[in-house]
Image (cartoon, rainbow, N blue to C red):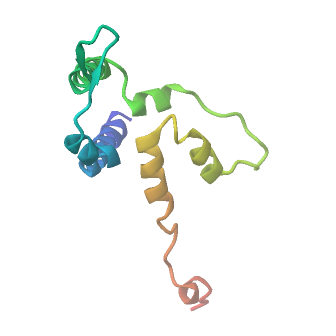
Amino acid sequence: MNKVKSICEDLVKEYEHKMKGKGSVFSSQSQTLNLIDVGVDGVNIDWRAKYQSFVSEQNIATAHRRSELDIYLEDGVLPDQGGEFDILTWWKVNGIKYPTLQIIARDLLAIPISNVASESSFSTG
């Protein structure tokens, strides 16, 4: 079981790395904007410096929290719904909670379950 979890963790890290490489739509725009505003007392407020400080604090906090995979595995098993469970709808609804796992599930669920030719399946010889 530890080997399976290790493989899943590696897969999540790989996808997270790919997602970080894409960046944000706003990242290129923020480089061209000068976000300085005048405060109430007339002192300039450098919003970019405040934002960078906020991001640094968030990154430190993120390093100490549980991984997305750990949270998913700790959530527990859903009760039987009498064959009415729709995995695609579940991932659509829960993708906000597990964004990286949602992308992995999308990619894995797109793989055909079987690629055996129907001829050989029904062959009697």
The answer to whether any part of residue 17 appears in the image is no
Q: Is residue 36 left or right of residue 1?
A: left
Q: Residue at x 54, y 86 (%)?
A: 120
**Relative to residue 51, is residue 23 depicted above or below?**
below
In percent of width and height, residue 100 lies at 40, 43
Q: Position of residue 50 (x, y in %)?
A: 25, 20
Q: Is residue 79 left or right of residue 77?
A: right
| Total marks placed | 0
Quarter of the rendering occupied by the C terminus: bottom right
Between 30 and 96, the one lying in front of the other is: 30
Compared across the picture, whether 46 is left or right of 16 comes to left
**x then y, percent, for residue 46:** 22, 22
The answer to which image quadrant residue 42 occupies is top left
Going 48% across and 46% down the picture, which residue do you hit?
102
Report if residue 19 is visible in the image: yes
Which quarter of the rendered picture does the N terminus lie within?
A: top left
Q: Reply above or below: 119 against 11.
A: below
Q: Nearer the viewer, residue 79 or 109?
A: 109
Residue pushed farthest right? 82
Extreme residue in the top direction: 41
Residue at point 31%, 22% (across, down): 62
Q: Position of residue 104 (x, y in %)?
A: 42, 50
